[in-house]
Image (spheres, rainbow, N blue to C red):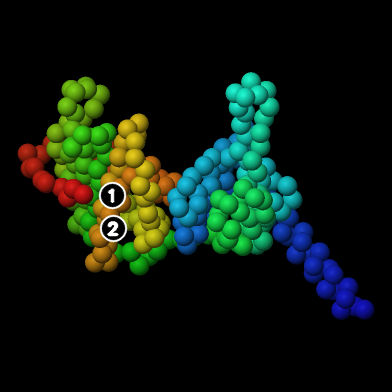
Amino acid sequence: MISHRIAATLTLILLCSSIAFAQPEKLKGIWISSQLEMIEILHTGPESVNYMCSRELKENFFHLFIHGDTLSFQARYSTSSTHNQVEYVDRYDLKIVRSSDSELVVEPISDFSKAFFWDKPSITLRKKESLTDRTIAFEKLVYHSFYGGSAPYVSLQVDSAQNLYVHFRNEYGDKNLRKGTYSAVLDDDTYNKLIDQLQNAQLRALRFSDVKGADSPITTLIVYFNGKRKHLKSIAPPRVARDLLGFIASQLARYPGLKPTSEVRELEWP
């Protein structure tokens, strides 16, 4: 009799723990699977914006509501056929199976979520901060960002000796934009932050979707590490690469130590 009571108590504790895991603050952040499926939880409620990504790198934003142990990602919209008077709701519901500070296991339980995640019975994700790969040995990085044409607006290269080379194209003479070539030797702090970004970018598994268009810059990223070459190019890089690309654009392309140089390099071009 006592053993039955103990078992029942343990079951109740586990159930309560499961529900407690569905607390917004504990779930906030980016969660990534080994196949680059992603859940990014920022806020909850009808005005919230959160993101999910499938293994095909199909990304969408959603409103998020939490009902007990269920994460209800919702796409809400209206149509002209109802004169925008009727709001439709597509629910991408995920039941929390298990959760900790570094791991989140969910089960798609609605038709939309099952289709989005290709009928997988469950998805195991890990917090982005816990996915640092210290075995990444950096050698060289080449980055291009451009709007059409054959020449990039900005190209840069940085190597393991901390040498940075940047070329800016400003063919329209915009006074707000740099032009010409610059170089610098990165300080240790900036270089170490670059290594941290690379080691936390899921570099071995990272993929870019083959999305074409003219309303956003095309991003090209070539990384040499551990004797390998990783080439990525897209108009819409996945959100899992956002931190790395943001660092390159803000901390390297705008590095305060850049000085004009007469050296002209032919950077690797895909």
Locate residue 12 relative to residue 57 in the image: left or right.
right
Kindly report the distance in space between the C-alpha atoms of the residues bearing marks 1 and 2: 8 Å
Label for residue 221?
1
Where residue 57 sits: x, y (%)? 45, 50
Identity, as a three-letter code, of the amino acid under mark 1: Leu
Locate residue 104 relative to residue 145 in the image: left or right.
right
Position of the N terminus by quadrant? bottom right
Where residue 7 sits: x, y (%)? 83, 73
The answer to whether any part of residue 196 appears in the image is no
- Residue to which mark 2 is pinned: 230
Circles 1 and 2, Cβ within 8 Å, touching? The answer is yes
Above or below — where is 100 with respect to 62? Answer: below
Residue farthest front in this picture? 81
For image coordinates 73% across by 60% down, the residue present is 17
Residue farthest right in this picture? 1
Q: Earlier in the sequence, mark 1 or mark 2?
A: 1
Q: Image quarter for residue 5?
A: bottom right
Above or below — where is 79 with respect to 230? Answer: above
Label for residue 49?
none
Total number of numbered labels? 2
Q: Secondary structure at mark 2?
A: strand
The answer to whether any part of residue 73 appears in the image is yes
Where residue 123 sits: x, y (%)? 57, 60
For image coordinates 32% across by 32% down, the residue present is 214
For image coordinates 65% across by 44% down, the residue present is 91
Q: In front: 10, or 211?
A: 211
